Image: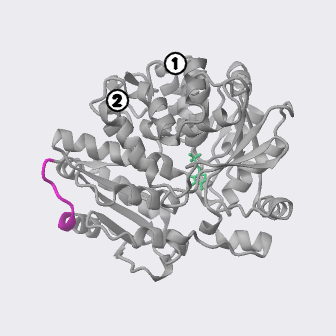
Amino acid sequence: MKYISTRGSAPALDFDDALLAGLARDGGLYLPEAWPVLTPETLTGLAGRPYAEIAARVVAPFMAGSTLLGELDEIAAETYAGFSHAATAPLKQLGPNLWMMELFHGPTLAFKDFALQFVGRLFDRLLRKRGQRITIIGATSGDTGAAAIEACRGLASVSIFMLHPKGRVSPVQRRQMTTVDAPNVHNIAIEGTFDDCQDLVKALFADEAMRDEYGFGAVNSINWARVMAQIAYYVHAALALGGPARPVAFAVPTGNFGNVYAGLGARRMGLPIPRLIVGSNRNDILTRYFREGRMEMAGVTPTLSPSMDIQVSSNFERFLFDLYGGDGAALAEAMAAFRRDGRLDPGADRWKAATAIFEGHRFDDEETVAAIGRLYRETGELIDPHSAIGIEAARAASLDPSIPVVALATAHPAKFPDAVERATGQRPALPEAMADLEAREERCATLANDLPALKSFLRERATTQGAA
Ligand SMILES: *Cc1c(COP(=O)(O)O)cnc(C)c1O
């Protein structure tokens, strides 16, 4: 399988190189040259199989030609054995045709574990085969940092340096990062904002000599392998509800469009998914596009669902590539204009094609809290603010009521206990395996918002040997 860039001018790569590359050299995102299709017989044969087996069968065609293909079953088994629920991604019925898929039984209690636990293992095995090392550098305001650290802990060929703004991430999120006791994990609290952290990371990547010496890499959501791994839970849920014979729709709380794009992937692979319903918080560039046909950047507003506080949804470019008929040059021009002008109007025909599949609904904090309270009163279930937006989007969808809708629950309620308590009067408890999080020892350096200080910190701790 070859991977091509959405901007058309970077060379096509095989799976292994696309895995390590992340962003393409022309600034685009990698996509498979052609979408593999699973026949109805193959899909039916997967119904009822364990999650790890479904995951391996779904991702195998995307990894055709990879040196890791022979180890795929083992990698998938190892990845999902670390999840705490026997069903890995259990479905709960909330209403006559409304379901919730719980994607928070991984080690950091958010859906990002599904992809990062898998991709961390792919990275490690591939780098060891090549005799290379990589230094992952990232900035986080919450979930991503914890999931990335948990995915990289203890890997022989990876070191990870994660920056967070000091005092500005929630205590649970901070502790999930800083209590990981592994020699290759380095937490850094920066005296500054999240934007300062991101600027420092960008400045590090801009130092080409250092980048090459230490083999800097990223595990952000533009990595193709993350999208690919997420397709599996859409397939798993659809099969459980009678697919592929029966159509199933999905509702997804979205920031970067990375999760819901994997739902589109499941549709491309042959599952009848008539509708993908996007839920936004007040940072609603996507729902505005689906409603009005134009994209307009706006400043980021902090909300109760911070993992969706995003101005530009990076993975949307993968969908735009389809809307532009696979014309990378035309999309490169459109994206440059979007950066320059802060607005993009892809035109009426593309909007029509987009809204044939997607619809979007936006909820502010008050509506989010009301939704958490309402579901608790109706069913006794506690849900986190991100999941609440997905469930509300499912309820708001304009859809034939005979079609089941699965709303994706992306975080455990105990990750956002204040909002849940405000809505329900109940403070959700952490799962037992994490109940002692408060008591665990934290390991974290504090640095000023200062690039030279960060660089010397890195030089003291990162290894250069055989950098990728
Ligand atoms: C990251 C995250 C999201 C948003 O996912 P995208 O792939 O960026 O759309 C939603 N909910 C939670 C809990 C998250 O951590």
Give the magenta-colored segment's residue range.
459-466
Closest to the observer, 143 or 348: 143
**Foreground disc of the pair 2, 1:** 2
Q: Is residue 276 visible?
A: no
At label 2, which amino acid type do we have? Phe
Image coordinates for residue 37, horizontal then vertical, percent: 53, 19
Residue 15 is marked as 2
Closest to the observer, 379 or 316: 379
Q: Main secondary structure of the magenta part?
A: loop
Image coordinates for residue 221, horizontal then vertical, percent: 47, 45
Marks 2/1 in contact by CB < 8 Å: the verdict is: no
| Whole-number angstrom distance, CA of label 2 to CA of label 1 | 19 Å
Callout 2: SS? helix
Residue 97 picture quarter: top right
Residue plotted at (37% across, 33% down): 24
10 Å neighbourhood of mark 1: few (<14), some, or many (≥20)? some
Among all residues in the image, which is located at the extreme left? 465
Residue plotted at (79% across, 44% down): 98
